[in-house]
Amino acid sequence: MTEGVTTPQGSTTSTDDLEAVLGALGTDPGRGLAPDVAARRLAEEGPNELRGAPPVPRWRAFLGQFQDPLIYLLLAAVVVATAAWWLEGRRGLPVDALVITVVLLLNALLGYSQEARAERAVAALQRLTEVRATVLRDGRALQVPAREVVRGDVLILAEGDSVAADARVVEAHALRVAEAALTGESTAVSKAPGSLPAGLPLGDRTDTVFKGTAVTQGTGRAVVVGTAMDTEMGRIAALLESTVREPTPLEREITFVGRFLGLAVVVIAAVVMATVWLVSGVSTAEDAVAVLLLGVSLAVAAVPEGLPAVLSVVLSIGVQQMARRDAIVKTLSSVETLGSASVICSDKTGTLTSNEMTVQEVLTASGRAHVSGVGYRPVGQVHLGAGEELPEEQRAEGVVLLSGGALSSNSELREENGEWSVLGDPTEAAFLVAERKMGLTERRERRFSRVGEAPFTSERKRMSTVQIDHEHDDQPVLVTKGAPDVVLERCTSYRVGMRTLPLDDDVRARVLQDVERLSGQALRTIGVAYRPLVDAAGTPVLDAAYLEGAVPAEVAEGLEDDLTWVGTVGMIDPAREEAGAAVREAHRAGVRVVMITGDHPATALRIAQDLGIAGPRSRAVSGVELDRLDEAGLREVVTEADVYARVAPEHKLRIVDALQSHGHVVAMTGDGVNDAPALKSADIGIAMGITGTEVTKEAGSMILRDDDFSTIVAAIRQGRVIFDNIKKFLRYLLSSNMGEVLTVFLGVLLAPVIGLDVASGGGVVLPLLATQILWINLVTDSGPALALGVDPETDDVMARPPRRPGERVIDGRMWVGVLAVGAMMAAVTLLTIDVFLPGGLVAGEDDLTVARTAGFTTLVLAQLFNVLNSRSQTSSAFRRIFTNRWLWASIALGVLLQVAVVHLPLLQRAFGTAALDLRHWTVCVVLASGVLWFDELVKVVERRLDRRRARAGAEAGGRG
Ligand code: ATP
């Protein structure tokens, strides 16, 4: 076999004979590829990834920063300023034009670097959520990232796997694959090796598995014939070519606000320009240029240019923080959704509990026995209580029960340096530990060998193995363990000591009662039963061929009838340490917690009560009940029920839909392949990182790396904090811009009142220069806004109800605040100018340049004071004022830059400023701080109003 044989394009079709395909790919289905061959192919053929649109080159991304109508306005301003300089006789340098150009470049650079940073963060997250595949390399099964799968690799497929590439099936055991993603067909398709004729539609190609589909059942092996874009999925992706990130709802709202502001400002600018033109009378070319620049300044003043970049940086910092706390969010928009989650539907086992099972009770026909010892360390005894030995009969029953459980187990118990651990399902491992405590392991292992298995699924709630009993004429026997109610239904006799008696209704009822009692003590109950697979004459009822060691799963499943009941074990699965506190926190935050589990209703209810999920009078709704309910009935039930037990994955989907129909924002956890539809349907699908299958991880919008319920609550908390912070910097940026607009607008309108007209001798005067406004936006925009974006949480994040979905981020109340603070900023700025100019309300004696510099400085300082205001809509700026060091750093930097622009000759020339003395600075600081005091006052009123509203609400509630 030679390496490097290329198969023709379209190798994913079924036209080739299987043997021929294997030969061409140079692979051996029994051993897979050699690692070096795989590495070489990966290097030659590239990673197994669907290619979206090609990445945007850096220079294009940089130029993209200029693609904004507002920037076009500024570019027009450059032209206007250059024209003015030309008209005025080309004296010196065209300072205005140069300054605007430099500012534009800086702004673009800043925007570009922030966007690049956000993108890097998202890419890093994507690597964390990478899908993995199991492949055979040199005869050994290895887990590799799906992107490293190459042609010729042998995929090992198991339930819950996501198929990594198009591959020809070479081995299949009851292998079924859901291909809805590709064909739209919802029922799973059986796959088997073969060489089907050419031209079959996708859905009929049962000899091939396709990239992006999901294994729903069974196991198998398949040889990869096509990767990346050379797959059926790739063909669709090539048609769509859309891996562009969708803007989040929040980003859409911000874009809308930006557009709205842009439009508003064009109107305002036109009105102001017209007014100035008419009122002041434009006589010279210089005046005309000034008016044009005024329009441009207004436009620049009104729009927070840096907003989109700040937003994506803050979101991406947020998701990085979440990832550090084991909650990996796959899309930025999930952060917003998390903040408004109103119901968490959580699995029990492993999420609310620790999934460390220990058998504690052994219940058989002769009575109840206790097992001592905790954890996986097989040290302890089975006794009647107080160390009393078991009677003969009861011991015999216990032996069958625990060995039976151990026989139908796929787990492994391991000891390393005295530490015991398990590999596989903890429920099964618990049997191995208990059996070892009774000293039964060696004998059981000698006596039986396994020839078949009907696997456990969440729907079946049981599993069976077929064993050959070497101490009993090599007779085959079926051993079943599972949910006691489910197994008992399939029993016709029961075991007492060494005898088998018929199972009548009385015994059945007694067993169920006992199970109920164990479950009521929060124990997980598992029943065990068996069936000798021989007829009355002792001849095996199984095909001889099967007994060689390969009873197919379907055959084993068909034998799960007419069983002999042995008994039940009760296992403890302690609640996770932090789960109770997390439930309380969720409740405080107005988030309902609902438990959805496959476990026994009594067990589920008891644990739910212990954790505070359910009240003392709650009851558990069972899957059987759900089946009887129609959609309307279910809608009613979900308003009350906090615990669902003995449910199957398809119930989860119905529960999500019913909750959503009440307007709830639902977070739903899941691990098995059949949970995927519910995860997709939920507002936030949460896949388990440890126990979750690849398919659920793909379907979920968030992955819980530690499977821990409290991480969900922490993520909701984080989502809320991020959302709060976004509000903070929006409040800050918008009020700052409002301040600038009003300063320019009112300054021109009120020129005679504040003495601006005197200073100019009647011509057009601007309270601020366009370049100064640009400076303000550059100094005040990004730094403090970013610092607000990482502000620490406030005390009440988890003490208020979730945000209603669709609620505006910038609501009426925020707009009023923005307008009020903006008006105050304009007032103090214009007052400063008035104070220093001759004439006006207060008569000063400085010239226009100095007065304008002072006004400019007051506005900058007022915005820096406003950073403190913006941290909350209602609580005082002085509360926890020193908790954010970034905030203070950005304020300090702002002050430093302002000192520089006022006092450095180079910057003075560029920004039309003049040096201020101590008196000027003092007046600026004092007047600027007015914004802080003013907002403190507003907040006192806000708090009063809030209290009054709350009281009115409570009274109305009390009456109702
Ligand atoms: P969750 O809370 O995540 O739904 P669960 O383990 O309680 O977890 P399932 O895994 O669906 O839910 O299990 C349902 C029932 O099946 C359990 O209550 C138990 O009685 C039984 N069971 C669980 N695991 C096994 C197993 N490995 N073999 C046999 N029966 C099992």
Image (spheres, helix red, strand yellow):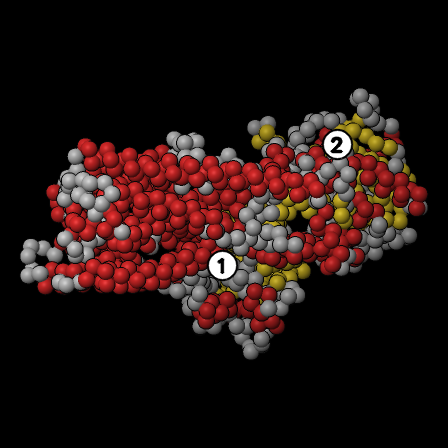
Q: Identify the element where label 2 is drawn.
A: strand
Q: Residue at x 23, y 63 (%)?
A: 278
Q: Which residue position is annotated with label 1? A: 153
At 79% from the left and 42% from the top, the residue drawn is 527
Q: Name the foreground residue: 166 vs 288.
A: 288
State the image quarter where residue 958 is shown.
Answer: top right
Total numbered labels placed on residues in the image: 2
User: Marks 1 and 2, how far apart in space?
Assistant: 46 Å
Inspect the image, locate mark 1, and give the three-letter code of the amino acid beneath it: Asp
Q: Which residue is mark 2?
A: 360
Residue 281 relative to residue 255: left or right: left
Hey, which residue is sitting farthest bottom in the picture?
A: 199
Image quadrant where one finds the C terminus:
top right
- Marks 1 and 2: CB-CB under 8 Å? no
Q: Position of residue 47 (x, y in %)?
A: 42, 59
Around disc 2, counting alpha carbons within 10 Å, would you say few (fewer than 14), some (14 to 19), or many (20 or more)?
many
CB at disc 1 and ligand 1 closer than 8 Å: no
Judged left or right of residue 59, residue 357 is right
Quick one: 934 or 633, which is closer to the camera?
A: 934
Task: Identify which residue is drawn at 32% across, 54% down.
Answer: 302
Q: Position of residue 9 (x, y in %)?
A: 44, 72
- How would you rate the neighbour count of disc 1 (Cα within 10 Å): few for under 14, some for 14-19, many for 20 or more? many
Mark 1 or mark 2: name the one nearer the start of the chain.
1
Q: Is residue 423 above or below residue 197?
A: above
Q: Is residue 72 visible?
A: no
Label 1's element?
Answer: loop
Instruction: Check the picture and name the quadrant holding the N terminus.
Output: bottom left
| Amino acid found under the numbered disc labelled 2 | Gln
